[in-house]
Amino acid sequence: MHGAGNDYIYVNADIYDIQDPASYAREWSRPHFGIGADGLVLISRSSCADFRMRMFNNDGSEGKMCGNASRCIAKYVYEKGLTDKTEISLETLSGIKHLSLEVEESVVRRVKVDMGPARLASKEEVATPDGSLNHVSIVVADQEFSGCFVNVGNPHVVIFVPDVEAIDLETVGPQIERHPLFPERINVEFVQKLADGHLKMRVWERGSGITMACGTGACATGVAACIKAVGGNSNIVEMPGGELLIEWNGDGSNIFMTGPAEIVFEGTIMI
């Protein structure tokens, strides 16, 4: 399945008890040698919510949250008949998320996700005295960038630039991800404000590299745009894989992400 081009392999873990999912995430995610994906997502029932999500990046590392994957899970559980509810709670490593499904003729067209509030500082994730990136420059590949730290269940640095296509993301992305400023590594978004007010974003995901889209990254971008007065409380974030609507009413309020989810194909693979 994919959400705005962010594609994962989804497995019903209540039926298939996959041991060592990190190794299968690496193996199955390899293009040409496996299925090819940004990673592996396991879906199961939860003791504290309707369903539970575990997601593994294509390098085998386990992520705390994936916005695009959460929308795909909502589509999966509804269209597979695992629930008839259009309001679903989802357990993740970053807390319980609430999903609202837009259904037409038994097909989930879009999903709105309550992502919870943003954190704008973290001394564990940013090696500065206050845990923020205020007045701090990131220097990589002989270039200096000014970024905004936003945690939306996982950590992001959002960098506004005049032209996102001019950024050598394959070079600077991994260097920023592993920069000493970020002891737990970080997701990286480069963002350009377009003439129509939309925000054009390219992303280097921690553990996955360049992807077509990142839901939490789009949320971080919407928050950073509001903080930096680049955008308003409601922003369309354009990514190579599609668009997401991000809504945020300021510090302390929850972030809402709305976008599509698509099933690409189903099949079997031997373990």
Image: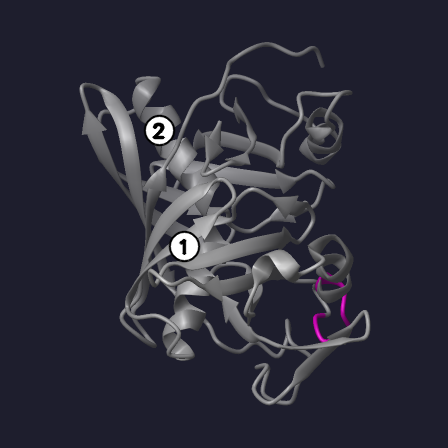
Look at label 1 and name its amino acid.
Val
In-front residue for pair 55/190:
190
Residue 242 lies left or right of residue 252; in this view the side is right
Residue 234 coordinates in the image, percent (x, y): 28, 62
Residue 145 lies left or right of residue 250; in this view the side is right
Is 122 in the magenta? Answer: no
Residue 95 lies left or right of residue 42; in this view the side is left
Q: CA distance from mark 1 to mark 2?
A: 21 Å
Q: What's drawn in magenta, residue-wise?
A: 177-182
Q: Secondary structure at mark 1?
A: strand
Is 179 in the magenta? Answer: yes
Q: Is residue 13 above or below residue 209?
A: above
Look at label 2 and name its amino acid.
Lys
Residue 220 coordinates in the image, percent (x, y): 46, 63
Residue drawn 52% across and 45% down? Answer: 213
Residue 46 seen in render: no
Which residue carries the number 1 mark? Answer: 237
Q: Callout 1 environment at 10 Å: few (<14), some (14 to 19), or many (20+)?
A: many
Q: Nearer the viewer, mark 1 or mark 2?
A: 1
Residue drawn 62% across and 61% down? Answer: 188
Residue 153 coordinates in the image, percent (x, y): 49, 59
Residue drawn 37% across and 78% down? Answer: 229
Q: Is residue 203 above or below residue 146?
A: above
The answer to which quarter of the image holds residue 224 is bottom left
Q: Main secondary structure of the magenta part?
A: loop
Which residue carries the number 2 mark? Answer: 75
